Amino acid sequence: SESLERHEFGAEVGRLLDLVVHALYSEREIFLRELVANAADAVDRRRFEALTQPDLGLPAEPKLRIVPDKAARTLLISDCGIGMGKAELAEHLGTIARSGTLAFAKSLAEAPAEQKPSLIGQFGVGFYSAFMVADRVEVTSRRAGTGEAWVWASEGKGDYTLAPGARDDAGTDILLHMKPDAEEFLEPFRLQAIIRKWADHITIPITVTRDGQEEAANEGTALWRKPKAEVSEESYTEFYRHLGHVFDSPWATLHWRAEGMLEFSALLFVPGMKPFQAVEGERESRVRLHVRRMFITDEAGLLPPWLRFVHGVVDTEDLPLNVSREMLQATPVLARIRKSVTGRVLSELKARAKDAEDYAKFWENFGATLKEGVWEDAEHRKDVAALLRFRSSAVEGWTSLADYVSRMKDGQEAIYTLAGDDAAALAGSPQLEGFRARGVEVLLLTDQIDTFWPERLGEFEGKPIRSITQGSVDLSKLGEATPAGEAADVADLLPKLTAALKDAVSEVRATDRLVDSAVVLAAPQYGPDLQLQRLLRRAGR
Ligand code: ADP
Ligand code: MG
């Protein structure tokens, strides 16, 4: 028709479609998970916007409908969510706004087979998985609050069309014209099984139409509201996977109910795997806030940024259902919940840290993030410091500050550290020679954040923390180096060296830090240490 507009996909979409369709062929059923998740998100968004604009309100009994039609070989997924206007259809379904194809392709190539399916969700390209099973997709959508509907259609081959359409109420219909080899997904039993597997925790009712009847396909219970004794480990794991779009199992599951001054249920997970970082630099906690089961927002910052690896749900009775964004920012209730939930996560980590081998699994994934707490959270600094683990010049594996202190030599007054990019390289550094020869242990710090937090912490159990590249460390108090080398008399040499090197260094000093090497670089006592200088140089400062 004359009002049909044809558009090219954004440059990256074409390649992406190819990747998704081919790399994930054996996991085709996840297209339904992705489309249902989008539909449920859209309903949540409409509910949230209606808090401030009541005319956007949801129908009395909101649901998601899945309607297979074998004769027409189509599958319809219909929601009553927020909907999309013309510009939103073009933007959300025609370009990849959030992440590059390249990053996705790279992760896809590198990920082990069992993790590939979760990548789709993490990279925000879920919609395109429809083309794994469909050779044509038509999206009819009407934005809540508007009167017009638009139809987006594509065969997934480089372009899409936009044309005016019709829809009685706000929401979105996704109509899939199924490929001949994807007819199994028109079987109601198969669809129900997939929903039970992937979407049982979606709290809005989902129906699958069979013989003209709409049959409930999900249980739709709020798992976190059930008593712990009634929840199986498998249910926890499924819910965890659903929440995080991941396929591993949680390292920790925390499920409790607070009663008394504050009333809330919480179900939180510490992942068993480090996620692929789709959105670099995202620091806010995404723990979901519900009020009496109903999802409100995942932007309430329910945990501090240094615990952002924790996923889950907090569901409270202490806020009204029609809570507004402004109220969320102002209410003391959230601050109290935050404090309580943070304390609970910290005590879980403390308890689990007693088993070194078990704790190491957590530490290797999220230790660097946890360290940010020492840097930025005065209230929890001490508690977090006790949870830190390090490589060391003296012992194998991971060690804590408390263990280090218990091994300190007589006369040793400080906790010594050496920062760099790589523990193996640090272990061979000439900076360590004098310490090693005297049997003095040095902690090896290899995360970027290690350049920052030690100064904030200052000390642990009364022992100052000192970088061994900073200023002159008086090693004589720590005993003789073994074997005691003949100290060369370099007094005459020093002024000559200082003069010769005056453009490169501020001073040349004699040191007892070295045993085998002749020279070593040191940083001034009161400036950035060597690793911080390196980082600042890299950042062009
Ligand atoms: P993601 O869900 O991670 O953002 P998707 O590719 O699954 O990535 O979806 C892209 C975007 O398209 C969504 O963020 C949303 O804005 C929009 N969208 C997809 N499906 C729907 C729907 N049923 N209703 C409203 N908006 C939708
Ligand atoms: Mg999605």
Image (tube, grey):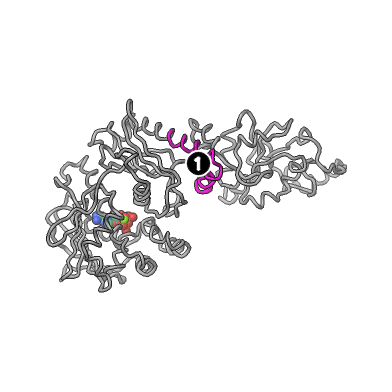
Q: Classify residue 341 as left or right of residue 375.
A: left
Q: Position of residue 406 (x, y in %)?
A: 66, 33
| Magenta-drawn segment | 343-372
In the image, residue 368 lies in the stretch drawn in magenta: yes
Q: Is residue 514 magenta?
A: no
- Residue 143 in sight: no
Classify the position of ligand 2 by quadrant: top left, top right, bottom left or bottom right.
bottom left
Query: How many numbered circles are shown?
Result: 1
Q: Please determine whether, in this image, residue 474 is positioned above or below residue 215.
A: above
Q: Quadrant of the N terminus?
A: bottom left
Give the residue pinned by disc 1: 370
390 or 258: nearer the eye? 258
The x and y percentages for residue 241 are 37, 51
Can residue 270 be spotted in the picture?
A: yes
Chief SS of the magenta region: helix
> At which x and y percent is residue 186?
22, 66
Kindly state the secondary structure of the residue where label 1 is placed. Answer: helix
Residue drawn where x is 32% and y is 41% of the image? 230
Is residue 267 left or right of 320 when viewed as pictured?
right
Left or right, 107 with respect to 412, comes to: left
Query: At 19% across and 51% down in the image, what residue appears?
Result: 63
Mark 1 vs ligand 1: CB below 8 Å: no
Across and down, in percent, residue 9 comes to 31, 67
Q: Is residue 171 left or right of residue 157?
A: left
Mark 1: give few (<14), some (14-19) or many (20+) Cα within 10 Å. many
**Which residue appears at 66% of the width and 35% of the height?**
415
Amino acid found under the numbered disc labelled 1 = Leu
Q: Nearer the viewer, residue 339 or 532?
A: 339
Q: Quadrant of residue 65?
A: bottom left
| Between 83 and 290, the one nearer to me in the picture | 290
